[in-house]
Structures are given as C-alpha cells and as structure tokens.
C-alpha cells in the first residue's frame, strides 16, 4: 500500500518529506518521490528502489523559507516499478501523489489523450493531474478545478495535489484509502497516509473520512464532506508511539491485516468486475490459447489457495486442474505437456521451491502465470504473465490478507475462463460477480464475533491436538485454519477432509481432541454434519462453525446466513484467522514473528 506525505511551512522541506516517507516504509514500496513548490517553481525528484536512492538524488537540493511539498512511496498496482511510474506525477505546472486505484482511469485517459494530453506513465494516477489541468482551463478557481476533478474519479483514493496555479496550497481528498491531516503550534500543516509519518511533527490530527476533501494553505484549512458541505475542523491529540502507529491501533500486524481484508479485497476487485464478465487487463487472451489443463504450484498458505482454485477451475471453467506442492514437484520428474498452463501462487514472489518449479515449467516450454503480491519480484519478472493481488505489504508471518486476495483473484480467474470457454451461463457469471462484490462486507470483522472468539479461545489451550475438518473448498480452508494455528500457537493441528475421519483419525477421538468443524449451509452440509456427529458420539470436543444451529457441538460459532458457499468460505476464513490468533495471544506467543518461521522462505 502506498505512502503519502505533505507539508506546508517554513522549515527545510526535503528532510520533513523524506523522514515522513521513511516512517511509512513498513507499508512496502518499490519506488519513491517528492515534489516541492516554492516561488511558483517546482523541484521534482523520483527514484526506484529504497529511499536511500531518493536521498542520493536530492542530496544537493535544499530549501530555505516557506514552501509546500508532497511525497510518495509507491506499491505498484498499475505499471511496473520504474521512475516514470513513480509518484509524484506531473502535468504542465502541477503535481499529484495518490494511494488507491482509479477504477475508471482508462476512459479518463482516453478522453484526455483525445484532448491532446501526453501521458508519460502506465499508472492510473497520472490521469488525476491531467484532469485537474484540463478543468483548470475553464474553472473559476484552482479549487473548483480540483472539485470538478474529484467528481469524475471512481475508485479508491487518497490524493495530495499541488499546482503553481495555486502557490502555497495543497489540495487533498480521501475516499477509501487513508489520509490524515495534522498541525502543530508552529503554523505548519502536514499530511500522512498513516499517523506514523506525523508523530513528532504534529500535536493534533484529523483522520479524514471517505468523501472528504479540501484545501490547505499556510493560514487556512477548509474541509468539505461528500455533499460539499463545510466540515468543522475537529482535531484530536496524536499518540506518540511510532510502532503502535504503524499498527494503527491494532495489537499486532496480523490483527491489522485481518481487519484490512475488507479494504484490500476491494482493491483486488477494483477494475476487474464487469456486469457480466471479468477483466484482467494484465492478461493477454493468447495466454490461454491451446491450453487444456491448468497446473497450480505453490507452498504453504499459497498452496491452500491453489487447492481452492482447483475446485473452482474444474467446476466453473471445466478445465482439468491439478495442484502441486512446489517442494515435491521439483524432484518428482513430473510429466508436463505444452497444453498445460503452469500457475504459481506466491505472496512474496521469492519462495525458493515455487520459483524453481516455475523455472522447471518454463524450461519444459509451458506457458506460465504468477499470482503474486509483490510486483517486480523474481516470479513476476520470470513468468509469462502476472496478476497482482494488491494486498499491500503483509508484515505478519502468518499469511491472512494475502490468502484472501489470492482466493479472490483465483475465483475471478475461474469465472473469466468460464466466460471464455462458455462453460457457465452468463446469468451464473453475473450471479457470482454479484457475490464477489459482497466480499468486502463479508470479511469485515464483526467486533462481537471477535470478542466471542477471544472469550472462547481460553477453552482450547490444553488439548492433545486439533482437527480442522471440512469438505470441498472447506477442506483446503481447514488446512489453512490448521496451519494458522500451528504457526502462531505452536499447538499441533491437522486439516482433514471430513469424510476421511472414519478412515483412521477418528481413533483419536476423545475429550482432549479438539475438532473445529466447518459446516457451510450451501456445500455438503448434511454429509459434513454426519461426519461431525460421528466424532461427537465419541466424545471429541467439538467447535462447529456454521450459519445453522448445531446442537451436537460443545461450542458453536454462528456465522451469517448467506446465499452461496463461497461467501461462507470467506466468512469462515476470518473466524479461523481470529480464533488462531486469540489462542496464540493467550499462550503469550510472538504473533507477528513466530519462532522458527520467516516471512519468505527463500532457501530450500
Ligand atoms: C503462511 O502463513 C506461511 N507464512 C507460509 O506457509 C507461506 O504461505 C509460504 O511460505 C509461501 O510463501 P509465499 O506465498 O510467499 O510463496
């Protein structure tokens, strides 16, 4: 997720902007830049890679006296990490930085190109500054041009825009991506996409709300709501703890990332959902020409996402699909054919076993696709095509939002393929696109449910093991739930197909065996229910997760009634993530950096 800073004041501005960006590094980025406006003159600096490269470029740049400036660290969503794609983006005499995704950028870009505008970058962001200058030609004031620009934007954004047409001014807007406005006793005004960038520089802040926008100068700040009504400036004191600021009030990065799933899934879906079809503009249709089979390959949580996809590809796209654990695939001399599309899934894009598997597939002459969270990673650079999951940096070693966005992308991909292969009726594709649109709301954490899981966790600390059981896509979800628990609580847990319990594992059933049973209403409920009853009859301690009441369990977590099993999947995913986290918290473990684990396993 990108980082944004802004400053209005009399201090040397370069250090303030770059120090602010440094506090946002934890969000992950692949390029950075600043733009400073002083005496109607712009100074613009951009660099790919880390901030040290930007510092090198600005080492001879200093300002004295009043100036305004904006800065940005970019997490690539549209366009590779290059200097041209780095923010700030410039027009004739204006600069803009942006966090989020402009969903209708292509149509705006086409209109502006027809008006003779020349674009330099591949980004969605660049349309903002050119649209502003387009309106500047006829607007009564630069602020009017800014408000007219905002009216045209669809999607998520946090924007800072400066223009020589409005010297000493920063225009700002917030919709879907975070933006915080701060001030101090020295008449300075600052902006940040996280309060981590403002700590030590401001005493009081306003956390802008969606739809709010305004204009700030050295003397005044004007704030408006989505109805263009003036909003009273209600500043609140700013906390002084930087690390807690990076966690934005959550106890752990993992917890923050579970709560972020609603927003990041919105970003994942942004620009990809049509009314009747799916769009992946990053894919060329030729990728699928001559393809009769899909082989998915990954490790860990990403492997579980691949397993979910295998059900969806065969069910929706009617294409033979297999799933490989990368560390096994590498050494089993696999039989590969050129009509197979090799799809690797990886949050980091650097996992050694998955990367080597990708190399094997390329060497065997297969077409390759990577679904990844890090642009410009080794796998993205190596594969024939890539789809970015747009989850933003995932700091918790136990993967959560990466998994959620991987499954979202794979579900969309299965529908895109179904449309291309005409294996689903348009009405069914439309229905599932409607379901996808409900995901941000589905994964939004219900505080009461979280509190229930926190209370319940104390009862699951001392068993001799856990079984997480489910059928169909709830089997890989059970595997994922077991992995989450193992990773952070260090308690033993297994994911198992419900129907397999009677083939041996049920011998373990006793009160000390905890069974977490996934009982979706819309997928094999009765079959799974009877499997759970077999365990209950042998006095296993059972925690059932279902939208339907189930009286054979010791504990029951009631999820919402929904219209489809894939919606149930995402809701149960959140339950399993939080349940594991609350157990691990009670055990006093390091939630974000569990023992023995690394965020990216770049060794065999
Ligand atoms: C998941 O919680 C773990 N951190 C681990 O299993 C991870 O999914 C696996 O190492 C694969 O990583 P990747 O997605 O970056 O390739």
Image (cartoon, grey):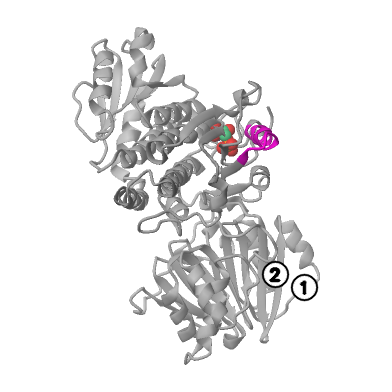
Among all residues in the image, which is located at the extreme front?
Answer: 290
Residue at x-position 56% and y-position 31%: 299
Q: Earlier in the sequence, mark 1 or mark 2?
A: 2
Image position, residue 515 (x, y; %): 34, 20
Residue 362, compared with residue 188, is above or below; it is above
> Which quadrant of the figure has residue 495?
top left
In the rendered view of the protein, which quadrant contains the C terminus?
top right
Queried whether the magenta region covers residue 360, the answer comes back as yes
Residue 523 lies, in percent from the top left, at: 28, 32
Q: Does any portion of residue 211 appear in the rendered image?
A: yes
Foreground residue among 108 and 202? 108
Q: Which residue is mark 1?
A: 61
Residue interval drawn in magenta? 354-367
Q: How many marks do you count on the picture?
A: 2
- Please provide percent x and percent y for residue 104: 46, 68
**Dominant SS in magenta:** helix
In the structure shown, which secondary structural element does the residue marked by tag 1 occupy?
loop
List the residue tagged with mark 2: 14
* Mark 1–mark 2 CB contact (< 8 Å): yes
């Amino acid at each position: 997720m990108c980082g944004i800073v802004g400053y209005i004041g009399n201090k040397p501005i370069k250090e303030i902007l770059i120090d602010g960006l440094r506090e946002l590094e934890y969000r992950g980025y692949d390029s950075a830049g600043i733009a400073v406006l002083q005496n109607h003159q712009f100074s613009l600096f951009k660099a790919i890679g880390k901030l040290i490269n930007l510092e090198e470029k600005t080492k001879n740049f200093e300002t004295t006296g009043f100036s305004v400036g904006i800065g940005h660290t970019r997490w690539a969503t549209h366009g590779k990490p290059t200097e041209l794609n780095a923010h700030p983006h410039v027009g004739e005499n204006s600069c803009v930085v942006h966090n989020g995704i402009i969903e209708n950028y292509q149509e705006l870009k086409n209109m502006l190109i027809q008006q003779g505008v020349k674009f330099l970058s591949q980004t969605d962001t660049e349309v903002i500054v050119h649209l502003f200058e387009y309106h500047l030609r006829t607007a009564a004031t630069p602020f009017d041009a800014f408000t007219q620009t905002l009216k045209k934007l669809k999607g998520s954004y946090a924007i800072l825009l400066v223009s020589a047409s409005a010297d000493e001014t920063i225009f700002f807007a917030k919709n879907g991506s975070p933006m915080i406005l701060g001030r101090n006793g020295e008449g300075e005004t600052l902006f940040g996409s996280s309060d981590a960038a403002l700590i030590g520089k401001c005493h009081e802040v306003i956390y802008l709300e969606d739809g709010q926008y305004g204009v700030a100068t050295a003397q005044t700040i004007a704030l408006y709501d989505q109805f263009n009504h003036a909003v009273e400036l209600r500043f609140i004191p700013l906390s002084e703890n930087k690390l807690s600021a990076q966690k934005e009030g959550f106890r752990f990065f993992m917890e923050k990332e579970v709560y972020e799933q609603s927003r990041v899934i919105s970003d994942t879906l942004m620009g990809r959902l049509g009314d009747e079809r799916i769009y992946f503009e990053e894919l060329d249709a030729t990728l699928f020409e001559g393809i009769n089979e899909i082989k998915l390959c990954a490790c860990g949580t990403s492997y579980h996402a691949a397993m979910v996809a295998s059900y969806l590809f065969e069910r929706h796209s009617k294409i033979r699909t297999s799933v490989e654990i990368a560390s096994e695939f590498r050494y089993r001399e696999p039989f590969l054919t050129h009509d197979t599309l090799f799809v690797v899934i990886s949050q980091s894009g650097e996992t050694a076993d998955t990367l080597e598997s990708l190399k094997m597939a390329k060497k065997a002459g297969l077409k390759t696709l990577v679904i990844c969270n890090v642009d410009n990673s080794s796998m993205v650079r190596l594969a024939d095509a890539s789809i970015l999951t747009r989850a933003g940096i995932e700091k918790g070693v136990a993967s959560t939002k990466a998994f959620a966005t991987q499954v979202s992308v794979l579900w969309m991909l299965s529908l895109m393929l179904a449309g291309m292969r005409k294996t689903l009726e348009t009405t069914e594709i439309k229905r599932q696109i409607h379901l996808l649109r409900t995901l941000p709301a589905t994964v939004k954490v219900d505080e009461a449910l979280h509190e229930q899981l926190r209370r319940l966790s104390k009862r699951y600390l001392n068993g001799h093991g856990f079984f997480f059981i489910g059928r169909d896509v709830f089997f890989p979800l059970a595997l994922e739930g077991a992995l989450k628990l193992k990773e952070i609580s260090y308690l033993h847990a297994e994911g198992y197909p419900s129907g397999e319990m009677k083939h041996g594992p049920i011998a373990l059933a006793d009160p000390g065996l905890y069974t977490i049973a996934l009982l979706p209403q819309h997928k094999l409920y009765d079959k799974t229910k009877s499997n759970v009853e077999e365990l209950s009859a042998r006095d296993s301690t059972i925690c059932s997760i279902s939208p339907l009441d189930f009286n054979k369990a010791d504990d029951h977590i009631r999820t919402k009634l929904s219209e489809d099993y894939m919606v149930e999947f995402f809701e149960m995913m959140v339950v399993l993530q939080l349940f594991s986290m609350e157990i691990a918290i009670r055990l006093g473990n390091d939630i974000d950096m569990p023992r023995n684990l690394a965020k990216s396993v770049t060794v065999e």
